[in-house]
Amino acid sequence: QSYRPSIILLDVMMPEMDGFTAASKIRALDTTSETSIIFLTAKGTKDDRRVGYLSGADDYVIKPFDNHSILEKISEKVR
């Protein structure tokens, strides 16, 4: 809880907790409530994106993606 990242990159599919749950928990903490969250995931349906944004995502990027565009998104969020 003492770590305050500027940005967090999450996948939806993770081994112990899905990214939607992780994003919700991140948003609930005072120390990370304002941290930018970007999903990088293969889960690309409308429902997946909707749940991603509802769970606290600032952006939702579907794999495969262009590395340059991700770096631009990160630069925008950490300014």
Image (cartoon, helix red, strand yellow):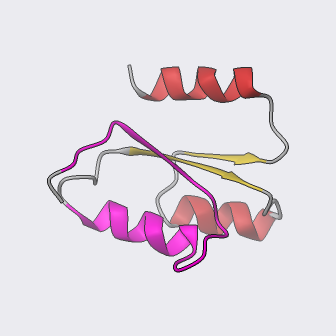
Measured as percent of width and height from the top left, residue 53 is found at 57, 58
Residue at the spot 61% in from the left edge and 23% down from the top edge: 71
Measured as percent of width and height from the top left, residue 77 is found at 46, 29
Measured as percent of width and height from the top left, residue 4 is found at 23, 44
Q: Is 16 one of the magenta-colored residues?
A: yes
Residue at the spot 72% in from the left edge and 67% down from the top edge: 48
Residue 72 placement, left or right of 35: right
Residue 36 placement, left or right of 31: right
Which residue, as the protein is rendered here, is positioned at the far front? Answer: 15
- Where the C terminus falls, by quadrant? top left
Q: Is residue 7 above or below residue 68?
A: below
Image quarter for residue 66? top right
- Where the N terminus falls, by quadrant? bottom left
Q: Is residue 55 above or below residue 37?
A: below
Measured as percent of width and height from the top left, residue 54 is found at 53, 65
In magenta, the rendered stretch is 3-29
Q: Is 13 one of the magenta-colored residues?
A: yes
Q: In this figure, what is the number of numbered marks?
A: 0
